[in-house]
Amino acid sequence: MATATLTTDNDVVLAEIFIAAPPARVFEAITDPKQASQRWGQKGMYRLTSTQADFRVGGKYRNEGVSQDGKTFSVEGEYLEIDPPRLLVHTWLSSYSGFQKTIVRWELEPRDVHGLQHRGPHRVGTGTVVKIRHSGFAGNLAQAKAHGEGWKRVLGWMQAFVEKAETVETRA
């Protein structure tokens, strides 16, 4: 289960989850637009309707979606750092937060099935701790809290997608 906390200044959301798959597989699920549209969302809540990405430092991405009440939304930004399969940093501007520019930092750490960190090539039973640092809320407590809850959902959906091939269409 994903966790999310706020820093005391309400500027940063810190979220984390363990996914029972190697970092390369998790990184692919994060960065492949086709997989994003399969994993991101839930019937009766919200879902992506289009994803575009120019996956390179300086490249742009844009995701569009629709909520259960038919309202459209978008999330867009620029890739700042890419170091597969361990690090991805990008800006985040969402229509539902008034396009306040924030920064999302994904860190992927290999762990074995017992939770021990290790280095070197993958071993059977390798998993990944995914850590997100979403910063730049500038004390906007409502937006920080909403994004914290959102990250818990999104990370849970990604875990179910990677571990059990659960998609928006098959998710209950």
Image: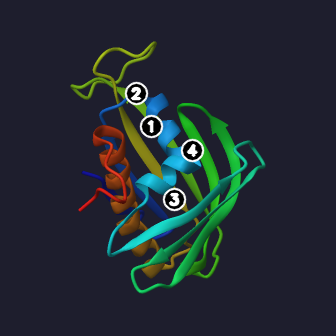
- Badge 3 vs badge 1, beta-carbon distance below 8 Å: no
Say which amino acid is labelled 2.
Pro
Q: Nearer the viewer, mark 3 or mark 1?
A: 1
x and y percent of residue 120 in the render? 46, 13
**Mark before the other along the chain sequence, 2 or 3:** 2
Say which amino acid is labelled 3.
His
User: Is 171 or 77 nearer to us in this picture?
Assistant: 171
Q: Secondary structure at mark 4?
A: helix
Q: Which residue is mark 3?
A: 134
Q: Secondary structure at mark 1?
A: helix
**Mark before the other along the chain sequence, 3 or 1:** 1
Residue depicted at 61% across the width and 82% down the height: 98
Q: Nearer the viewer, mark 2 or mark 3?
A: 2
Q: Which quadrant of the figure contains the C terminus?
A: bottom left
Vertical position of residue 63 compared to residue 127: above or below: below
**Mark before the other along the chain sequence, 1 or 4:** 1
Vertical position of residue 42 compared to residue 70: above or below: above
Q: Which residue is mark 1?
A: 26
In the figure, residue 72 lies in which quadrant? Answer: bottom right
Q: Which residue is mark 4?
A: 31
Q: Secondary structure at mark 3?
A: strand
Q: Which residue is mark 2?
A: 22
Residue depicted at 33% across the width and 69% down the height: 43
Residue depicted at 51% across the width and 79% down the height: 140
In this picture, residue 83 sits left or right of residue 58:
left
Q: Secondary structure at mark 2?
A: loop
